[in-house]
Structures are given as structure tokens and as C-alpha cells.
Image (cartoon, helix red, strand yellow):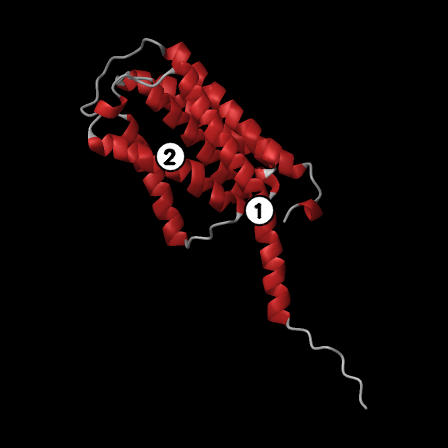
């Protein structure tokens, strides 16, 4: 009788390998997601929310809720490789993040003043950003994928999360206050987070990155 070697199903092996990668990515993503939610909720509980939070115009409040989903869930999921949107969809998501940030955090019409509380709001935004950056670094989220763009997605998500925290905390509506104490701090966070993520990746052997 002729001995036959068991046939190898290439598609099944590829599917199994992809499933292993997805499990590994979820292992990075899930704990970081829960820690982020705890950090955000804890910060707002400790510092307090703005007294007019639920009295805001419904488009602004709805935009802030959408931003929470985008920055806490969608951006990091793309970064670690759990979501693979098309190029057009990625551009749309970025557009939602940018336009939604301005629409959800500014109160129209814009007020020219508002230079008080800059130091406290700037410090709180940076502090929340540093906390979320620490969660991302400890969870290994920045080194899950080989693409440098993955680091940018994660950094953008945590910076928008920090910005949303200060939006729910601070009732100031002045353009100067927003630009200096809120937006400038968030912009600095994304730069520092991207640089930190890329530096951490560069210190690891390529074989340790999926």
C-alpha cells in the first residue's frame, strides 16, 4: 500500500496564523482600552465635569460622544491592526476626528477672550495625555505592528482622548483659551507620543514586532 503524506491546507494554515495575530493584538488592545476608560472616568471624577455639560447644544454633545468612540476605540484599533479600513475610509475617519474636534470643543460663535485658567487646563491636558501614553507604552500597543503609521494612529487617539477630557471638564469658551490651554497641549501630546512610540519601536528587534 502506498503511503500518503497528509495534505497541507495552505488556506487553513494562513487563517490559523491570522487568528493567532488577531488574538495577540486583542491581548494588547483590551487591557489598554479598559485602563484608558478607568483613567478617563477617574480623572473626570477627581477633577469634576463642567456644570453645563448636559446643557450644551445637542450637536456639540453628540459630537463629543462620537469623538469618544473615535479616539478611544477606532483610532487605537486601527493602530494595533484590529480594523483595516480602506484608504478612503481612513481619510474620512481623520476628517471626522479633525472637524469633530473643532465642532465639539468650540462654542459658536467664537469668543475672543478667555485667557484665564490656562495653566491649570494645560497641565490637566498634559497630565491626562501622559497617563494615557504610559498605558499605551506599558500595554505594548506601539510595537504591535511594523508600520510607523500605526504609532501615529495610537498617538492621535490618546491625544484626542486627553482633549475630550478637558472639554468635559472646562466650561471656558474663549478662542484664545481653547487654542493655548487645550489645543496646544493636545498637539504637543501627539508629537511626544509619536516620537516615544517610534523610539520604543526602534529599540526592539524586528522579530518582536508582528
Q: Is residue 173 left or right of residue 122?
A: left
Viewer-side residue, 106 vs 140: 140
> Residue 183: x, y in percent?
37, 24
> Residue 94: x, y in percent?
37, 42
**Residue 195 visible to the viewer:** no
Viewer-side residue, 165 vs 41: 41
Residue at image coords 42%, 30%:
161
CA separation in Å, label 2 and label 1: 21 Å
82 up-or-down from 164: above or below:
below
**Disc number for residue 150:** none
Element class at badge 1: helix
Residue at image coords 27%, 22%:
53
Q: Which residue is mark 2?
A: 68
- Picture quarter with the N terminus: bottom right
Label 2 packing within 10 angstroms: few (<14), some (14-19), many (20+): some
Residue at image coords 61%, 64%:
14
Amino acid at each position: 500500500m502506498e503511503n500518503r503524506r497528509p495534505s497541507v491546507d495552505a488556506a487553513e494554515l494562513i487563517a490559523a496564523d491570522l487568528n493567532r495575530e488577531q488574538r495577540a493584538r486583542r491581548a494588547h488592545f483590551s487591557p489598554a482600552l479598559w485602563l484608558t476608560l478607568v483613567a478617563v472616568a477617574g480623572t473626570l471624577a477627581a477633577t469634576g465635569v463642567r456644570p453645563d455639560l448636559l446643557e450644551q447644544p445637542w450637536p456639540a454633545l453628540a459630537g463629543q460622544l462620537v469623538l469618544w468612540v473615535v479616539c478611544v476605540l477606532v483610532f487605537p484599533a486601527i493602530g494595533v491592526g484590529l480594523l483595516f479600513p480602506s484608504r478612503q475610509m481612513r481619510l474620512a475617519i481623520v476628517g471626522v476626528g479633525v472637524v469633530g474636534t473643532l465642532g465639539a470643543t468650540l462654542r459658536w460663535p467664537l469668543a475672543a477672550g478667555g485667557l484665564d485658567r490656562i495653566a491649570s487646563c494645560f497641565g490637566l491636558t498634559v497630565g491626562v495625555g501622559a497617563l494615557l501614553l504610559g498605558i499605551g507604552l506599558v500595554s505594548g500597543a506601539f510595537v504591535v505592528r511594523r508600520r510607523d503609521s500605526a504609532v501615529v494612529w495610537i498617538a492621535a487617539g490618546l491625544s484626542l482622548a486627553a482633549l475630550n477630557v478637558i472639554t468635559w471638564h472646562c466650561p471656558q469658551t474663549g478662542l484664545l483659551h481653547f487654542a493655548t490651554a487645550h489645543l496646544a497641549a493636545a498637539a504637543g501630546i501627539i508629537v511626544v507620543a509619536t516620537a516615544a512610540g517610534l523610539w520604543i519601536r526602534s529599540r526592539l528587534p524586528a522579530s518582536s514586532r508582528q
